């Protein structure tokens, strides 16, 4: 096993020297680990067998298995899977499904989602008064509306991801609670109506834009192996972030204001690897 760990660190060092900080590399490793982690059981089993005199030769086999595991983590292309982890999702492969949720007395809506792999795209609109949804995936989703809590779930394995597009009326405020192996979240708003985005995932990718401002402050809370967050927000918007993890990378435009006192956007990340980008919406190059 020590040879396997040595090879792993050598390859990681080479990758970092050649590529510098590359969040996509770390995201790929986390995503691939969710796919290939049973290799660990195989290596443990071989180690136990190789401890006997008759099967001592198997320690060499364990080294080979370990190298294969490392190569899969580093080089396996996540987009070869039939998943929605990438926004280049092949919608034509699955049937388009619609759903609607009619208005009720609750002004705040909480979406609870539990998936192996999911892409969620959110559009806040002034011209609708009911929640309109579209999704693509291998099987029908379970959608339950319990007043202010809307649950959307699937038990399908990781290799079969879903894409969910939500058109939401601006008269409500929203919370999102997503539990997934791999999660994409994309938002597009004129004025922010989302109170909180909470994602617990092996790999999380959040991107989007808020073009005009914040009706309410936005809190983004993630617990993930790797997080990539990229948002475009108006100039002079206030922000605060707290990142807990081994590797952290941030890019914040100078026209945004950092403060811990009631910021427009607060980012709390407990992730092994975090890449945070906040840019001013509408600027050239953004």
Image (cartoon, grey):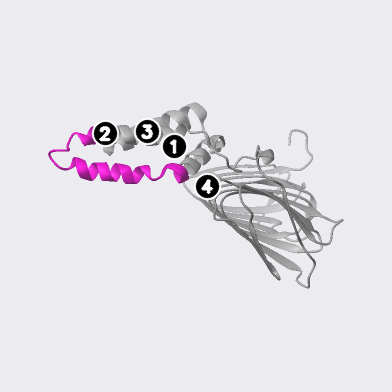
Q: Earlier in the sequence, mark 1 or mark 4?
A: 1
Q: Give the vertical position of 176 relative to 20 (above or below).
A: below
Q: Does residue 9 show up?
A: no
Which residue bears the numbered disc 4? Answer: 158
Q: Which quadrant of the figure has residue 148? A: bottom right
Which residue bears the numbered disc 1? Answer: 73
Of the pair 242 and 199, the residue shown nearer to us: 199
Q: CA distance from mark 3 to mark 2?
A: 11 Å
Q: Magenta stretch containing residue 119, yes or no? A: no
Which residue bears the numbered disc 3? Answer: 68
Tell me the crowding category of disc 1: few under 14, some 14 to 19, or many 20 or more residues within 10 angstroms, Cα based.
many
Residue sitting at 75 percent across and 71 percent down?
106
Tell me the crowding category of disc 2: few under 14, some 14 to 19, or many 20 or more residues within 10 angstroms, Cα based.
some
Which residue bears the numbered disc 2? Answer: 61
Q: Earlier in the sequence, mark 1 or mark 2?
A: 2
Q: Earlier in the sequence, mark 3 or mark 4?
A: 3
Q: Quadrant of the C terminus?
A: top right
Residue sitting at 30 percent across and 42 percent down?
43
Q: Earlier in the sequence, mark 3 or mark 2?
A: 2
Residue 169: % across, % down: 80, 59
Q: Which stretch is magenta?
A: 33-61
Query: Is label 3 or label 4 in front?
Result: 4
- Predominant secondary structure, magenta span: helix
Name the residue furthest top.
18
Q: Secondary structure at mark 3?
A: helix
């Amino acid at each position: 096993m020590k040879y396997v760990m040595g090879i792993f660190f050598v390859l990681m060092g080479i990758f970092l020297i050649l590529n510098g900080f590359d969040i996509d590399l770390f995201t790929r490793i986390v995503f691939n680990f969710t796919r290939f982690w049973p290799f660990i059981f195989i290596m443990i089993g071989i180690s136990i067998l190789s401890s006997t005199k008759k099967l001592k030769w198997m320690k060499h086999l364990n080294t080979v298995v370990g190298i294969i595991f490392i190569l899969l983590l580093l080089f396996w292309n996540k987009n070869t899977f039939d998943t929605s982890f990438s926004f280049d999702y092949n919608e034509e492969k699955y049937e388009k499904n619609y759903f609607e949720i009619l208005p009720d007395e609750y002004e705040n809506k909480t979406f609870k989602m539990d998936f192996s792999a999911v892409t969620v795209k959110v559009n806040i609109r002034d011209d609708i008064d009911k929640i309109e949804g579209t999704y693509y995936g291998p099987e029908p989703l379970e959608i339950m509306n319990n007043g202010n809590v809307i649950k959307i779930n699937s038990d399908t394995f990781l290799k079969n991801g879903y894409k969910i597009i939500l058109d939401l009326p601006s008269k409500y405020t929203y919370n999102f609670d997503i539990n997934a192996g791999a999660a994409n979240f994309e938002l597009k708003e004129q004025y922010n109506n989302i109170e909180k985005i909470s994602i617990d995932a092996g790999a999380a990718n959040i991107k989007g834009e808020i073009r005009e401002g914040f009706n309410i402050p936005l809190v983004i809370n993630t617990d993930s192996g790797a997080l990539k967050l990229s948002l475009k927000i108006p100039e002079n918007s206030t922000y605060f972030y707290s990142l807990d993890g081994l590797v952290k990378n941030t890019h914040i435009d100078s026209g945004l204001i950092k403060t811990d006192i009631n910021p427009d956007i607060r980012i709390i990340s407990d992730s092994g690897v975090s890449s945070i980008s906040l840019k001013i919406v509408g600027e050239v190059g953004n």
